[in-house]
Image (cartoon, rainbow, N blue to C red):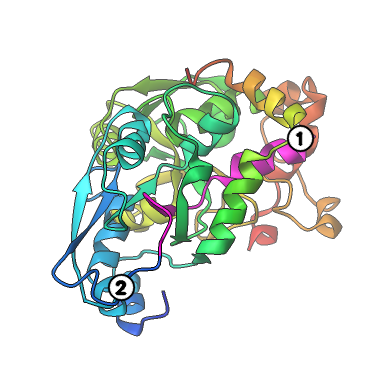
Amino acid sequence: MLESLLLLSAMFLAVFISIAAPCQAIAQDFYAGKTISLSTHSTAGAGYDAYLRLLSRHMGKYIAGRPGFVVINQPGAGGLLAVNYAARVAPQDGTFLTIVSQGLLVLEATGGRGLQTSLGSFKWVGNFSQSNNVTVTWGASKVKYLQDAIVRDVTVGATGAGSATVVGPTLYNALLGTRFKIIQGYNGSGQINLAMQRGELDGHANSTWTSIKTTLNNEFRAGHLNVLIQMGCARSRNCRMFRCCPISSSAIPEKKRSRTSCRSPSRWRGRLRRRPAFRRVASRCCAAPSMLR
Amino acid sequence: MKDPEFLAEAQKMNSDIDPMTGAETQNAIARILGTPKEVLAQVQAALGGSLN
């Protein structure tokens, strides 16, 4: 059951694009002289935005009529504003695509409020990357390891209720006993990163690794980021870089699990011992870094 | 997603490209939205109404 739960948590880590209407047979010259809008819930310069702007520079040559592209930023309500606009307001003729906040899948699956359509009703045209999510703190924070997040409060920024920045730390608090304090109201990951860098927040929870790599690469390379934990269906190829621990049950091969060694402080081990349902997860979180490569 | 210029620019931006096709994505969405009720109940309990 736990494995299924973590799979659900991990499955929405991908970055998706959907088109506002099912593709109909389109005339060869339909897109000639037209502009395709690429919408994102993220702010300019953030991870999703960077992917869309990259796509906008290359996609046109593969579409008959060579349409132009424009990227539209629609931040708000943890991604609900953008996806509801795509469903209810945007043209439904194939000239409007949106990239969907990963947290909204859990929002719909768990019956959360705010979605004005089912995500299953979109025509999904692809996915850029299947990145794991990572929770990071700034170097100056007293919280440098997952263990620290269990013994002291950790402030992390979030946009709105449907966002992964709320879903992730909430699940960690419930499953692992962490003490993430989620501060909502930031308009995007750029604002959250800035707040983290100036000490207003300890960290940024549950952002895609690709987003961190795109927006905070220099800071990461310079050692200014502590990566506490990652969440995903499979171990990240970048594990050797940040030496953090996947909580996904599939992250470490079965044959290696017996060789994991827990090196966490006794207080943390004690807490986890009192949570028998999650003991297996904890042992994997403490796996030797060499096994995570 | 196989365009060499696209991939080169993605690499320059430090953006990973590990794509899924539309059909694969559609299947993943259907799988998530079809999560068994008992699993969803656990997630709902863990989230504690924080998504509302």
Label 1 sits on a secondary structure element that is helix
Q: Decide which of B40, A271 is in the foreground and name it.
A: B40
User: Is A15 a magenta residue?
Assistant: yes
User: Is A19 a magenta residue?
Assistant: yes
Q: Residues within 10 Å of mark 2 (few under 14, many from 20)?
A: few
Instruction: Please name the amino acid that badge 2 sits on.
Output: Ala
Q: Decide which of B23, A224 is in the foreground and name it.
A: B23
The percent position of residue B9, horizontal first and vertical second, equals 29, 74
Compared across the picture, whether A274 is left or right of A110 comes to: right
Per the model, the C-alpha gap separating discs 2 and 1 is 49 Å
Based on the displayed image, in which of its 4 quarters is residue A74 positioned? top left
- Pointers 2 and 1 in contact (C-beta within 8 Å): no
Chain hosting mark 1: A
Q: Are marks 2 and 1 on the same chain?
A: yes
Based on the displayed image, in which of its 4 quarters is residue A23 positioned? bottom left
Residue A27: numbered disc: 2
Q: Which residues are magenta?
A: A1-24
Chain hosting mark 2: A
- Furthest residue in direction left, as rendered: A33
Q: Decide which of A54, A242 is in the foreground and name it.
A: A54
Q: Which residue is mark 1?
A: A2
Compared across the picture, whether A88 is left or right of B20 comes to: left
Instruction: Please name the amino acid that badge 1 sits on.
Output: Leu
Compared across the picture, whether A11 is left or right of A17 comes to: right
